[in-house]
């Protein structure tokens, strides 16, 4: 049971040097129809402008945690988990935003699930210069290994089962026992997912409604925009314990090869 002073959900937003974007993200979290939450913004290193901008928000549920030095996105999220008081942890990237009913829809599903390790995602709107589409096109399949759901395509148009970080709601126990891997320049989300789903009894569910706006513009500064085929290959090789042979093959074909093309290698 949660005490009256302890929120049920802790929202973690890592940010640095993007005050306009993080204000939008934090606002979308504070404006949820589900009110029993706290919003923890981790400022990843010295950034007085962002701190000052967030200080203008008049909502006692907002907590701003400035780190004395930059630790990277993975450690910033881990710091947020350590500071979280809720039984559930939701992650939100500073350049995305939630639709108002996001947390309520996931809590409705979570409330009926037993066990310490629960992972609930949702579909999302992927917004690019070309328009908007709902992703992932397909949702989880109980009889398919999780790594194959993530990486394997049925055809070139179908896409994978990739679930974006800003859609996640995970039990605090899972977030604590499976911290983000420090120092990863990319794949922080996929790395977390394959290790989390290897935990005995971990449950994974996707709310079928799109609940997040994921902005994926070509001029964005997302880490995922940086091509590095060798990193992708080495990461997949190190994590073969969590990835089936089929999923590994798709990872090479759909991630490593396109990056190699972009790198002219």
Image (tube, rainbow, N blue to C red):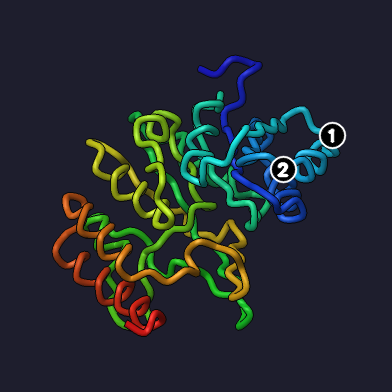
| Label placed on residue 47 | 2
Return the residue at label 1: 58
Cβ atoms at labels 2 and 1 below 8 Å apart? no
Q: Nearer the viewer, residue 34 or 226?
A: 226
Q: Is 96 located above or below residue 225 in the figure?
A: above
- Residue plotted at (47% across, 68% down): 226
Q: Is 146 located above or below residue 80 in the figure?
A: below
**Res 107 visible:** no
| Measured Cα–Cα span from mark 2 to mark 1 | 20 Å
The crowding category of the residue bearing disc 1, from other C-alpha atoms within 10 Å (few below 14, some 14 to 19, many at least 20), is few
Count of marks overlaid on the render? 2
Image quadrant where one finds the C terminus? bottom left
The answer to whether 129 appears left or right of 247 in the picture is: right
Upstream in sequence: badge 2 or badge 1: 2
Q: Secondary structure at mark 2?
A: loop
The answer to whether 136 appears left or right of 76 in the picture is: left
The answer to whether 95 appears left or right of 188 in the picture is: right
The answer to whether 236 appears left or right of 30 in the picture is: left
**Res 204 visible:** yes
The image quadrant of residue 177 is top left
Q: Is 103 located above or below residue 207 in the figure?
A: above
| Residue 221 picture location, percent across and down | 59, 64
| Label placed on residue 37 | none
Q: Secondary structure at mark 1?
A: loop
The crowding category of the residue bearing disc 2, from other C-alpha atoms within 10 Å (few below 14, some 14 to 19, many at least 20), is some
- Residue plotted at (49% across, 43% down): 169
| Residue 44 picture location, percent across and down | 60, 41
- Residue plotted at (45% across, 30% down): 172
The image quadrant of residue 62 is top right
Q: Nearer the viewer, mark 2 or mark 1?
A: 2
| Residue 215 picture location, percent across and down | 61, 66
């Amino acid at each position: 049971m949660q005490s009256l002073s302890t929120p049920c959900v802790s929202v973690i937003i890592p940010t640095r040097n993007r005050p306009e974007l993080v204000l939008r993200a934090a606002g979308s979290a504070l404006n949820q129809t589900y009110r029993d939450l706290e919003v923890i913004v981790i400022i990843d290193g010295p950034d007085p402008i962002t701190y000052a901008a967030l200080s203008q928000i008049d909502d006692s549920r907002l907590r701003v945690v400035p780190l004395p030095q930059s630790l990277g996105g993975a450690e910033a999220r881990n710091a947020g988990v350590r500071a979280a008081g809720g039984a559930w942890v939701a992650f939100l990237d500073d350049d995305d935003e939630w639709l108002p009913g996001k947390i309520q829809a996931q809590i409705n599903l979570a409330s009926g699930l037993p066990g310490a390790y629960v992972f609930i995602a949702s579909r999302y709107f992927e917004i690019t210069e070309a328009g908007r589409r709902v992703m992932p096109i397909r949702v989880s399949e109980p009889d398919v290994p999780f790594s194959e759901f993530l990486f394997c395509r049925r055809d070139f148009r179908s896409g994978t089962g990739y679930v974006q970080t800003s859609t996640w709601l995970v039990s605090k126990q899972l977030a604590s026992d499976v911290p983000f891997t420090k120092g990863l320049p990319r794949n922080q989300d996929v790395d977390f997912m394959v290790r989390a789903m290897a935990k005995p009894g971990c449950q994974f569910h996707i709310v079928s409604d799109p609940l997040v706006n994921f902005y994926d513009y070509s001029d964005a500064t997302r880490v995922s925009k940086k091509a590095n085929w060798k990193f992708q290959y080495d990461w997949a090789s190190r994590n073969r314990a969590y990835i089936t042979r089929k999923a590994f093959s798709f990872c090479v074909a759909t991630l490593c090869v396109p990056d190699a093309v972009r790198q002219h290698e």
